[in-house]
Image (tube, helix red, strand yellow):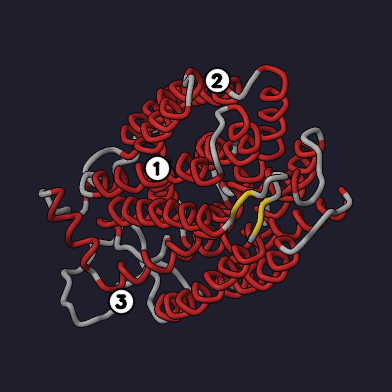
């Protein structure tokens, strides 16, 4: 089936704009990883201090996600997206002018407050506008932003940092984001169909009912593990690559570029595969690849550049398959009137879990006198453990979704009876 028959021209635009938004938000986080070795040297901070900078974004994003959850289903999603994206751009601008560690820490908190909600609003929009049968493909395309942030953003960011200082990376993101915001303001249509459903008028009660449903809580706990691996390994990736693998700062941009080029292909491929063979099967395949490669990668010593590239490409193949399939399954959990709140709470919990994982990672690893990152392999084993546990938890979610009848967005949900442990999930067998 051709793409023209699957998506309308406007749906293609929506996918593109959501992907670009994700690109800027993910890049804002990911650029910290390759800048780690530069920031630790320039600002004279330790790996533990650096992990605080990373986790500050996550914790503030988590807090704002929880606060926004009660209001997430009460407004046009376009207006919410514009509001939080504007704040995100301002926070990134603060990073661009931060003169020291404390200023950068404050700027990361502000950026997290606004940036942490953008992904959840985007997921709610995907659930509103696209059927379950094609959500794997939609998530695959939006996850291309993850790869594009490496192909375009991280190498350029490193080159800018090496030549013009680390502040220039954030100027690049803020400038590009401002252009994207204007395009979204002009061309994105209002997204307010969810306002036709019965929605709790009290935002705090709406938040409470969302976080008190057992089926939702289980989903939150499961997805919280998805963020832990990235927050543990990636912040120290550049330092591990230069000091442990023996790569140079000039080789890092090429490593990210090569990995990103292949990852761009993995996103749509994982999406199509999850729609065709099943989202949970795709998740298990990605988990198998990722667990094997994580153990190999975190135990490497001095490594030829081509081997480092191969390992990195394989790792992101597994990670992308996990992210795309798990995110697609996630969209089937909430009822239509709870989608915004559910996605906001889920994003908040993932951010908080990721922040906690970053802090834990900062306590596990240490830096030797020569700059080598020690105990990185122990960190790898912890990450593998979280992957295995999440696979078991996601099995029960997938089984419950598969037992439910398809539900469309336009159906008026029935009153809750409390007789079922899981909601009437929207979607087909997955």
Circle 2: element type: helix
Q: Is residue 242 left or right of residue 132?
A: right
Q: CA distance from mark 1 to mark 2?
A: 19 Å
Residue in the image at 69% along x and 30% along y = 158
Q: Is residue 412 left or right of residue 26?
A: left
Camera-nearest label, 2 or 3: 2
In front of the other: 210 or 402: 210
Residues packed near mark 2 inside 10 Å, few (<14), some (14 to 19) or many (20 plus): some
Provide the residue designation for mark 1.
116
- Residue 93 shows in the view: yes
Provide residue 201's location: percent of width, then percent of height: 11, 49
Q: Is residue 242 left or right of residue 126?
A: right
Q: Is residue 253 left or right of residue 129?
A: right
Q: Which mark is residue 191?
A: none
- 147 over 319 or under it: above or below: above
Residues packed near mark 1 inside 10 Å, few (<14), some (14 to 19) or many (20 plus): many
Provide the residue designation for mark 3.
422
In front of the other: 325 or 254: 254
Provide residue 137's location: percent of width, then percent of height: 59, 56
N-term-proximal mark, 2 vs 3: 2
Could you tell me if the residues under marks 1 and 3 are in contact, i.e. CB atoms within 8 Å?
A: no
Provide the residue designation for mark 2.
171
Circle 1: element type: helix
N-term-proximal mark, 1 vs 3: 1
């Amino acid at each position: 089936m051709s793409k023209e028959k699957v998506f309308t021209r406007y749906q293609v635009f929506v996918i593109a704009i959501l992907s670009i938004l994700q690109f800027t938000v993910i890049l804002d986080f990911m650029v910290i990883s390759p800048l780690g070795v530069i920031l630790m040297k320039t600002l004279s901070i330790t790996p533990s201090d650096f992990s605080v900078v990373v986790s500050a974004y996550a914790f503030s994003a988590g807090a704002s996600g929880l606060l926004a959850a009660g209001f997430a289903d009460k407004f046009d999603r376009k207006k919410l997206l514009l509001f939080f994206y504007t704040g995100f751009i301002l926070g990134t601008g603060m990073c661009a002018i931060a003169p020291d560690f404390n200023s950068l820490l404050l700027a990361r908190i502000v950026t997290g407050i606004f940036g942490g909600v953008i992904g959840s609003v985007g997921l709610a929009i995907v659930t509103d506008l696209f059927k379950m049968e094609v959500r794997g493909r939609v998530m695959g395309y939006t996850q291309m932003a993850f790869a594009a942030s490496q192909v375009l953003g991280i190498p350029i960011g490193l080159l800018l940092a090496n030549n013009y200082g680390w502040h220039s990376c954030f100027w690049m993101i803020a400038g590009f984001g401002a252009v994207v915001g204007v395009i979204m303001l002009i061309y994105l249509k209002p997204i307010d169909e969810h306002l036709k459903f019965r929605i709790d008028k009290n935002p705090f009660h709406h938040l409470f009912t969302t976080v008190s449903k057992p089926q939702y809580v289980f989903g939150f706990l499961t997805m919280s593990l998805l963020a832990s691996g990235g927050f543990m390994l990636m912040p120290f990736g550049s330092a591990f690559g230069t000091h442990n693998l023996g790569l140079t700062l000039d080789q890092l941009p090429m490593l990210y570029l090569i990995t990103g080029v292949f990852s761009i292909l993995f996103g749509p491929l994982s999406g199509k595969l999850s729609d065709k063979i099943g989202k949970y099967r795709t998740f298990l395949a990605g988990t198998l690849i990722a667990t094997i490669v994580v153990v190999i990668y975190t135990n490497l010593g001095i490594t030829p550049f081509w081997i480092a590239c191969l390992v990195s490409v394989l790792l992101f193949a597994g990670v992308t398959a996990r992210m795309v399939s798990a995110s697609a399954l996630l969209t089937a959990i909430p009822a239509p009137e709870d989608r915004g709140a559910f996605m906001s709470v889920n994003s908040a919990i993932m951010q908080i879990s990721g922040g906690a994982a970053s802090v834990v990672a900062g306590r596990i690893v240490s830096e030797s006198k020569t700059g080598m990152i020690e105990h990185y392999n122990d960190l790898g084993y912890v990450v593998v453990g979280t992957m295995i546990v999440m696979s078991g938890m996601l099995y029960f979610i997938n089984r419950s979704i598969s037992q439910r009848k398809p539900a469309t967005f336009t159906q008026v949900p029935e009153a809750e009876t409390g007789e079922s442990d899981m909601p009437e999930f929207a979607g087909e067998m997955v």
